[in-house]
Each structure stands twice: as structure tokens, then as C-alpha cells.
Image: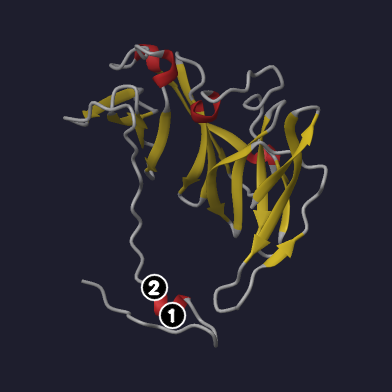
Amino acid sequence: MWTRHVRYANDRVFGRVFLEIHTLGTPSWRNVEVDPQMSIWSLHYPTCVNGALHWIGFNSLQMSILCFNLENERFQSFPSPPQVFRNDRIIDEIADKRINMGELRGFLYICDSSSFFDVTTWVMKMHGLGESWTKVYSIDTSASPLGIPAYPCSGFCWPVKQFEESACILFYDSCNCLIYYEPEKHGFKVFRIHGAQSKLVEVIRHIPNLISLKDAVKGDNVEVLNIYSR
């Protein structure tokens, strides 16, 4: 997916979105129709849930969730949590990190840490149904052992793992630490990442999978060179 810009009055303005898709084992890419009126500056936090890809999209006016359904190959807007993408929110390069999106236990989530006093996490319980967005965490960071971030632009928070008993692990990059949070007890346990001084630390969940690439990539035009690793 990419965007094309055009020259207008000595400036580059948004033109339209183009999207192509390639099926493994086929020899070429093919075009997917996109509404020419759809305006996007950038897409962040690609997340695959329920057979669809989701992004937080940005344009000159607001943030929104966009979705590409892999079954019917439609690219369209998607319901967002109430008040998270409100019209009075200032759109800037910092905002795209304070509000992030991902997947928790098969559900789409939005984590909003744009306020320096709390972190709120929403989960969509029924995919595609806007009314099913449910606030699962609202963490008062001013009452936690972390306190308010020393640098306002650094207070970014990402959910990493949610447990059956509603406890969760979050990554708080202002302090380079992991937080274990129990909502029923309002309790915190902080695990510092010692030696990590940079603000560019990232935590990525590892989910093991035993599916062979040899079985996943099929087609008459595919040649398997090596299926072994060292």
C-alpha cells in the first residue's frame, strides 16, 4: 500500500491511496480498488485480527482506524473506541505513539496514554461492532510507583500480555520497565530493564509456531531451496 502526492501551488498535496496484493505461489501482484476519496497521511500499528488487517490512520484532520478485510479485499474505515479519536485531539508525531493498537488474546485493543495521569486500554469484544468496545484498564499512573513521566513526550505505554484473571503486563518506555498490574487489587509490580538507557527500547511478544514455511508457501512457481536452519 502506498500514497501518491501531486504538485499544487508549489506544494505537494495528497493524491490517492494505491493497494496491491500478492498471493504466495502466484507470479504477479494485482490491484485492489480503494475509494479515491480516502485521504491518508500514514498508517501505524498494523494488527491482524479475525482475518483482517487494521491500522491507525492519520490525515490532516484526525486519527481513525482503517481495516483491510483479507476475505473480501475491501479497505475501509473501522469503528473506534468512544472519545479516543475525538475531533478536538491535536494530531502530531507524538500523538501517534501515545495511542497505539495491537492484539490481546485474539481481540483488537487500543491503548491510550495521551494523558500523563492515566493509561486507558479498550478491547473490542465482538469484531466489527463499535458498541462492543470495552474499557478493560484505566490505570492511575500518578498513584503508581512510577509517578508522572519526567519527559511528557516519553510516557508511552503498550500492553504486552493479558492473563485470565484480568491481570496484565505493560511496557512503560518512560522508565524502561515492565509493569505487572492487577486491576482488582489496584496493585503494581515494576520490573526494571537494567542497563537500558536509551529511549528507543521496544518490547515484542514472541508467539512460537510449528507451521513449516514449506507447507505455508505453496504453488507451481515456488522452488524450495532449503527447509533446514542452523
Residue located 81% across and 27% down the image: 9
Q: Which residue lies furthest to the bottom in this view?
A: 220
Does residue 72 appear in the picture of this structure?
no
Q: Residues within 10 Å of mark 2 (few under 14, many from 20)?
A: few
What's the residue at 35%, 45% (across, down)? 204
> 69 above or below 140?
below
Which residue, given by chain and number where applicable, does mark 2 sit on? 211
Q: Where is residue 20 in the image (x, y as percent from the top left)?
A: 67, 61
Q: Is residue 85 visible?
A: yes
Of 199 and 48, nearer the camera is: 199
Percent x, y of residue 228: 27, 78
Q: What residue does disc 1 label?
A: 215
For residue 134, side relative to residue 5 (left or right)? left
Q: Nearer the viewer, residue 69 or 199?
A: 199
Do tag 2 and tag 1 residues touch (Cβ < 8 Å)? yes
Residue 176 image-quadrant placement: top left
Task: Name the residue type under label 1.
Answer: Asp
Percent across and percent down for residue 115 are: 50, 16
- Alpha-carbon distance for marks 2 and 1? 7 Å
Q: How crowded is mark 1: few (under 14 residues within 10 Å), some or many (20 or more)?
A: few
Q: Is mark 2 on a helix, strand or loop?
A: loop
- Relative placement, left or right, of 117 versus 208 is right
